[in-house]
Image (spheres, grey):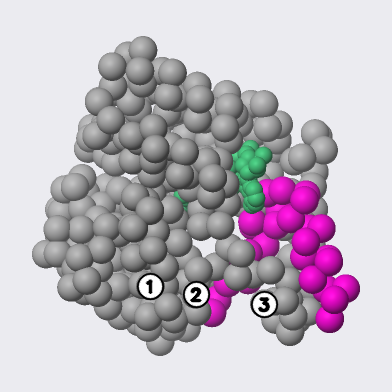
Amino acid sequence: MPMDSWFRLAVLHLAEQERVKSMFRKYGMRMGVQRFVAAESLEGVLKKVKELNGQGLAVTLDYLGESVEDPALADEAANQIMEMLREIHDQQLDAHVSVKLSQLGCGIDPAVSTKHMERIVAAAKYYRNFIRIDMEDSTLTESTLELFEKLVKRFGAKHVGTVLQAYLYRSPDDLIRLEQYAANVRIVKGAYKEAAAVAFPSKIDVDSQYVALVKAHLDGGHYTAIATHDQRIIEKVTAYVEEHRIPRNQFEFQMLFGIATQLQLQLVKRGYRVRIYTPFGKQWYPYFTRRIAERPANLVFVLKGLLRR
Ligand SMILES: Cc1cc2nc3c(=O)[nH]c(=O)nc-3n(C[C@H](O)[C@H](O)[C@H](O)COP(=O)(O)OP(=O)(O)OC[C@H]3O[C@@H](n4cnc5c(N)ncnc54)[C@H](O)[C@@H]3O)c2cc1C
């Protein structure tokens, strides 16, 4: 297995260990969490959204939380997301919302997350906004796509979209499946610990499937969110859209808060639409560890923060 894949899987495995979790809970903020997490409160993150909008960047807000096992926490997350939609509307922000089904209780009972999602997407439609269903680990791929299909039939592709992960072998078939709904799809490489039975272990294969998925969705004439910080892929995509005269309102680039900030602004300057995935809240641990796993250099600043304590 290539070094980069080995590193990513090793960090994700380590992050599941109780001793590591408790150390992060104690020293998290000093270890650099605030580089990736915009704020702990809704009020705090809305200020950040205004700043980002002021720089020409659109936002997708993410209320942190996943793998919820208590129905009260799923209710709380759903209520918070409803409030986010209200605030975005009232403050006229250029933002929509990303949601994880495991945050809304799909692990308790899929009926729980379905009920919450129906309420949330109905509110998004009322406010003329949009909900993106994030894609989690491969045990949830099928149920996420099934719920997406149910929602898109009822509320339309203007109000709900989802995500496909380039590392999964199944994604080209899933893309074809989503074309019938003219779905708004975010394409990502994939951030979870997956077995070689379901996902490419090699980065070269992931990158090449990534570009193929983006091109296929653009060629189909459907809205494509190209979510990556990979400069080589971004340049390939910009060359492709120019060459094939794909209108700029048929796609956007997306990046994560705190990552490749110069590149975000350069793309805005070049006239492309760029949206920043902006997480907030107190349940930052799994999100943060995935960001560390993506880049060996990130572990260095975490360790430096730890040594300063
Ligand atoms: C907007 C958005 C939404 C996402 N939603 C999902 C989702 O729903 N499901 C899912 O599985 N994954 C999601 N991801 C994560 C994605 O799967 C990748 O894990 C992540 O984007 C890193 O891959 P990359 O495309 O940037 O390419 P890589 O090849 O990993 O990185 C390319 C370059 O980007 C920079 N970079 C990448 N990651 C980091 C980092 N953590 N810290 C600092 N620099 C970094 C480095 O310079 C690196 O060389 C999302 C990513 C984005 C941008």
The quadrant of the picture occupied by the N terminus is top right
User: 157 and 277: which one is in front?
Assistant: 277
Residue under the image location 41 percent in, 18 percent down: 240
**Identity, as a three-letter code, of the amino acid under mark 3:** Met
- Check disc 3 and report its element: helix, strand or loop: helix
* Label 2 sits on residue: 39
Contact flag, marks 2 and 1 (Cβ < 8 Å): yes
Q: Is residue 265 above or below residue 213?
A: below
Task: Locate residue 80, reporting x and y percent.
Answer: 34, 78
Residue under the image location 49 percent in, 75 percent down: 39
Q: Which residues are magenta?
A: 282-309
Alpha carbons under labels 2 and 1: distance apart: 9 Å
User: 43 and 286: which one is in front?
Assistant: 43
Task: Locate residue 3, reporting x and y percent.
Answer: 82, 38
The quadrant of the picture occupied by the C terminus is bottom right
* Label 3 sits on residue: 29
Q: What residue occupies the far top of the structure in this picture? A: 243
* Label 1 sits on residue: 47
Q: Residues within 10 Å of mark 2 (few under 14, many from 20)?
A: many
